Structure formats: C-alpha cells, structure tokens
Amino acid sequence: MTAINNNGYDCKKITIPAAELLCKLTGKNKMRIPHPEGLFGSMEKNHQYLEDEGEMIPTKNGKESIKPNVMTLQPEMSLHKMGYGRDNSIDWTKVELPVKNNLLELIHERITNYINPDVFINIGNHEYRCHLLVLQSYSGLFNEKPVSKMEIPETSVTKDAFMYIYDWMLHLNQDSYTILNRENILEIFLAAQFLKITELEEQCWAFIDNEDLFFEDKAFMLYLDARKHCNTTVMELMIPRIQRFFLTLVSSKDFLELTVSEACVFLRSNYIYVNGEIEVFMSGVRWLMHDWEKRKKYLVEVMLCVRFGLIAPWQLVDIRRNPESEEFILVTNSPEVSNMIEDGLAFAIIKYWYGQESSEYSHSIDILGLTQPQPRNWVGSEKNYTCYREFLEALESLKKAHFLEKQTPESSDNEDSDCVPATTTLYSHKKTQPIT
C-alpha cells in the first residue's frame, strides 16, 4: 500500500503484509498504524515501534518490512459454554413417567412385616424383634436410650402388655385405642407409664376415668386389679363408684379376703346403698367372723365404721341381747363396742323423740356429747332382720339371683360386649439361648 502526503512531501512506500491487514483490530492482536506525520517525521529517529500484544517490536527506519504476526485462534469451547442445555423448563403435562411408591407406605410395610428389625426386647423368657424407630416415635424410654437390645422387667411390663402397645404403635388410624378393654387396661396403663408413652398413658387414664365403663361391679374388679399392682390412685378412684353393688360384694369371698383397712374403706363409705345401717353392722361382723381368732384384734377398728345412731333403738337392744345371734353377742361384749352402742342408742332416742329440726334435739346432742352421724344412701325400705343368720340367707339369695341372671343368653352377649376384641401381630419367640 502506498501512502501519499497531500501536503506535497515526498512519499515513502510502505509494504504491509496481508496477514497484518486481516488481523483483528481488537484484543491482543490489535495493530496501531502510526500517524503520517509520525511516520514520515525527522530522519534522525533511529527506530519506530509497533505495539503488538503489549511488546514493542523495533524496525529499521523506512527500510525493513514489519515482521508479520500469526493469527491467534480462540480456545476450544464446549456446547455448555456456548449456552446449550441451559433451558430447564419442562411442561409436565406432556410427560408421562412411572409412579414412585409412597415412602410412608414402604416404611410401614417393612415395619409391619418385621423386615430387618434392629432392636431386641427381652421380657421374661420371650424376645421381641422390633424397629427402634417405631419405639422411639412414642416411647420416651427408648428415645432416651437408643439401644439395640434391652431387658425389661416383667413386673413393670408384661409380655401381653408389650404386644398390645407395639400393635397400638403400628396402628395407622386414629382408633388405635380399640386395643383397650376392661381386662387389659390397667396392665397397659402401667406399662405405658414405665415406657414413658404419654399419649397412650393419657388414653388409658381417660378410659379408666369413664364411669360408663367402670361402675359398680366393674369398678370393684378394676379395684382388685389395681390392688395387685399396688396402684392406690386407681383404687381410690373406684371406691365411690361401688354403690348398689355393696351388698353383693359383701356376699362374695372377695369381701372376706380384704384387708382390715380395705374392708373399713367400704364400710365407712358415704356412697354405698343399704336397706339400713344394721346391714353395715352385719357386714362388719361377717368380715370379722371369717377368721375371728386373727381378726378380733380389729374389732374396734371395724365397729367404728358403723353409724350406730342410724340404727333403730329396738335393733340396738336386740344385737346386745338376742341369744339367736351369738356372733353379735361376741362382738358387743367388747367395752368399746358397748359404748358405741350406748351412744348410738341415745342419739336414736333423741332423734325419734324430738326430731332433728327442733332446738331440744340440738341441745340434747350437745349436753350428751353425741355426734350426729352422716346419713347413708338408702335403697328401698328398711329390712328387719331377726338374727344374723337371716342376714346371711339374704346374701345367699342375692348371690343366686345374680348368678342365674348371668347365665341367660342375653346376659352372656352383654358380657361378651364388655371387652373389645383386639389382635396383635407382634412377632416373638421363646428364647432357647442367649442372644449374641
């Protein structure tokens, strides 16, 4: 290429290789073309420089050609860097894929089929293979102690109770409480307390606290069950619920086997129903006479439960003098009991004479230092027993009537309905050798 100066100066011919002209004029291969005045300036300058990649290349003034530069290519580039494959938008309405199994269902299937159990529970001579995750989900005991093996005392958690409880844990629906019935409730309740299963413990207590489920005879049966486990809380809860069942209880062997403190609890109860206070007195005599030699030391303690002031005056005289009731005479020979009868007789006479609403009644009570007995719950009219033997015969008739009633088909059906059937699928086997 020839450059001509329009100002009339001599022109110099500069040859630029084609490679230089094709070079990209930007980036590291950019080439600076000198200004004409600078190119054709004073000849006294020895060198001119061209800038190439930040390096000054010396040339001979006007005579040497510029060394051509080699064109630099861009580095290899992937499709990803070019921008391909970055569009993640998917129209799922146009895509059909196989459905994934539900995780909860898969876990439940493994648990209920006891696939790869990871904890072994030993109760008595039985071993139960369970999943620790299930136990930890409900039991505070297992949550605090994540172990692979645990020995549980059978006195705290029975084998049956543990099976019921594990079945309760595996139950997916809200009606898991249907495993509870009158027969197993206390057993499960105590086990839930030991295992620290708060939800089940609350369900059990609500079940026990329901008077429709535990009243009269059923309340006493739970009382006996609680007594075996020394659970005084449940025992005390059941006592007020034994009301019209009292005389039936007195007719039973269970009443005779009560301790003196337990017998006195029922004899002094304000909730029992009787035909008259004389029945309470005779009930106390029945308990004492079951083993008189050993129980006569409890005579005063038992008789203090009787409210002699509520017994008719003629009956108070009869129990002290009637030769047909030797048991009564044996009991009333005690000076302490004799004084109780005297006070009761005085109160009964004042009540019948003055009536309880008059001022003379209150004045006489205060002068004689008597205490007005708390009334009982009366059922029907007062019965007049001529002797102790007659009372025992009445109890015998009561037992027979109840026994015959329970033998009828209708009663049998009702009895079966008392307990809600519950099944358990917990796998267990008797140990033949220690687990290693």
Image (cartoon, helix red, strand yellow):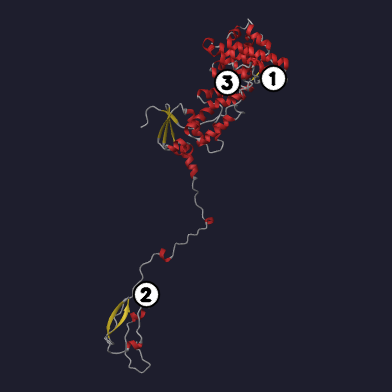
Which residue is rendered at x = 34% and y = 76% of the image?
29
Q: Residues within 10 Å of mark 2 (few under 14, many from 20)?
A: few
Amino acid type at mark 2: Gly
For residue 113, say whether it is visible.
Answer: no
Foreground: disc 2 or disc 1: 1
The kind of secondary structure element at disc 2 is helix
For residue 171, say whether it is visible.
Answer: yes
Q: Which residue is mark 1?
A: 362
Spatial CA span between label 2 and label 1: 123 Å
Most distant residue in the top direction: 323
Q: Indicate which disc, 2 or 1, sits on the residue closer to the N terminus.
A: 2
Foreground: disc 3 or disc 1: 1
Q: Residues within 10 Å of mark 1 (few under 14, many from 20)?
A: some
Image coords of residue 384 (percent x, y): 68, 12
Q: Indicate which disc, 3 or 2, sits on the residue closer to the N terminus.
A: 2
Amino acid type at mark 3: Val
Amino acid type at mark 1: Ser
Nearer to me, 430 or 269: 269
| Numbered disc total | 3
Looking at the image, residue 290 lies above or below residue 75: above
